[in-house]
Image: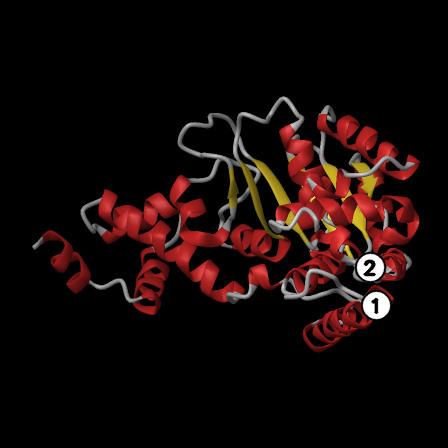
Amino acid sequence: MDELVGRSAVARGLRRRVLEAAGWKRGVCIEGPPGTALVSLGVAIHSWSERRSAPCLVLPASTYQELERAGQSLLHPVRRDQVEGGTCPLVGDWTSSPGTPTWILLEAASLPRGTVADLAREEGRILLVQGPAEEREVFREAARLAGCLVLTAPSLRERREDLAALLDRLASKRGCPLLRQSLTPAAQAVLLDQDLPGNLRELRLVVEELAREDSRRIDTERLEAALSRVRRSCENGTEANGGRRIRDRRWAPSLRSRIREVERAEILAALEGTSWNRQRAADLLGISRRTLGRRMEGLGLTQDLHAGRTA
């Protein structure tokens, strides 16, 4: 877990705070500037908690709201096919891991305050907030008042002495553990003195660029070229500075398509479980038969599909 690497006082304090959060019996809020590895911190909390034998699921808070509106509250057990449909990336094996999962909600600042208060009362709910300092401060206070333990991820600027260790860790994961040694002393000095506003994510991109270099020796000229490519990449697909988020491409598929997949799987399971009896399926789903009919039509769930499955 990259964010926890380092021997600085900041890194040691962060590890202590993660251990404290692992034993917390209510919700946890993790907030930090753009590019800090909030998901890794959330997974670390789960891994060190008594809940570690249960699955850990990560999804955007906006998806949570859509599921709430569809009547699929995350405050209650969810079906496995809801997870396997692609809405929720899974850390761990659901089938062999008993227990209620830990939910890590991305961009939790979009959640209504009443929802935050509900989640704060639940163990195993981890809310992540990245963005401008003002936005994080408002949410941090609301989460604290709701009973969440609040953990702040530090920027690289606050832990410069950990930069070399973080660089080695990321390079090793990339399969080039001697990357730092391939830099000339001058290039190392330049890199370790960089102000990386994209934090750990930007450092990871720098490692990716340097790993592509053919030369066994990377001088300051090659380093500056790699840094320029990373900055252009951040500026074109993202806005890393001033608290503006770097776009996270892991969630590139549209939210609407993910919700559609979940809804289709739920309705299809209900139909198949009732031999395609619409009234019984509607009762099972908690919606009216007319609503079920409209949703089936919109999702392409027709009697022809049923006939094809039973043929």
**Residue that appears at 63% across and 53% down:** 61
Q: Are marks 2 and 1 in contact (CB under 8 Å)?
A: yes
Callout 2: SS: loop
Q: What x and y, as percent, mark residue 222? A: 76, 70
Q: Which amino acid type corresponds to the residue marked 1 in the rendered image? A: Thr
**Label 1 environment density (alpha carbons within 10 Å; few <14, some 14–19, many ≥20):** some
| Residue at position x 40%, y 58% in the image | 261
User: Residue drawn at (54%, 34%), measured in percent from left and top?
Assistant: 101
Q: Residues within 10 Å of mark 2 (few under 14, many from 20)?
A: some
Percent x, y for residue 208? 66, 60
Identify the image quadrant of residue 210.
bottom right
The mark found on residue 248 in the picture is none
Which numbered dot is residue 184?
Answer: 2
Which part of the image, by quadrant, shows the N terminus? top right
Q: Quadrant of residue 15?
A: top right
Whole-percent x and y of residue 176? Answer: 64, 50
> On screen, 74 above or below 222?
above
- Tell me the residue that label 1 is attached to: 220
Q: Nearer the viewer, residue 46 or 75?
A: 46
Question: How is the structure coloured here?
Answer: secondary structure
**Quadrant in the picture for residue 53:** top right
185 is higher (above) or lower (below) than 234: above
